[in-house]
Image: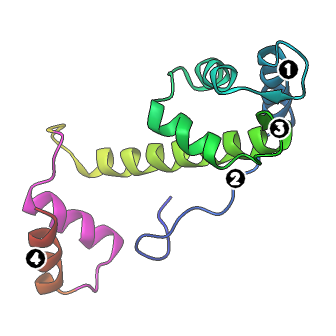
Amino acid sequence: MFFSQAGARPRMWEASPSEYKKWVEVFKACDEENKGCLSRENFKVAVVMLFGYKPSKIEADAVMSSVDPNTSGILLKEFLDIVRKKKEAQLYRNEIRHIFTAFDRHYRGYLTLEDFKKAFKQVAPKLSERIILEVFSFLS
């Protein structure tokens, strides 16, 4: 799938009912004291359970700074929104990786000028070679 505009982001992604249920279950499992919110440490555990990695201090700080200061942690609604956004970003990165891999025909991990030209001929055949060269020069 290609986006209609350069740099376009996919539309908002919706979780399936089973995925949504899993997120709620993880929230409840990490809310050890049944306060209805997750502490910083409990949030980190939830991210490990859902995404398989421990969030960095910077990521945890960013999340905690966005939390309502009148609560003692991340509420379920906030948690679900954070998880949905993380999942969207993950899917977007995977799509970009998939597109890149389709054009990296020799599995080198980078695109040569020829790879780049072939890719643009497939997705934007009317684009002038001059523009393609300018873009390639800008990116390399």
Segment tinted magenta in the rendering:
109-127
1 or 3: tag closer to the N-terminus: 1
Q: Residue at x 90, y 24 (%)?
A: 35
> Would residue 116 be counted in the magenta stretch?
yes
Left or right: 82 in relation to 1 = right
Q: Residue at x 40, y 74 (%)?
A: 6
4 or 3: tag closer to the N-terminus: 3
Vertical position of residue 78 compared to residue 118: above or below: above
- Real-space Cα separation, disc 4 to disc 2, in angstroms: 34 Å
* Dot 2 alpha-carbon crowd within 10 angstroms: few under 14, some 14 to 19, many 20 or more: few
Q: Residue furthest front?
A: 70
Give the percent coordinates (x, y) of residue 132. Answer: 17, 77
4 or 2: tag closer to the N-terminus: 2
- Real-space Cα separation, disc 2 to disc 1, in angstroms: 23 Å
2 or 1: tag closer to the N-terminus: 2
Q: Mark 2 belongs to which amino acid?
A: Trp
Question: Mark number for residue 13?
Answer: 2
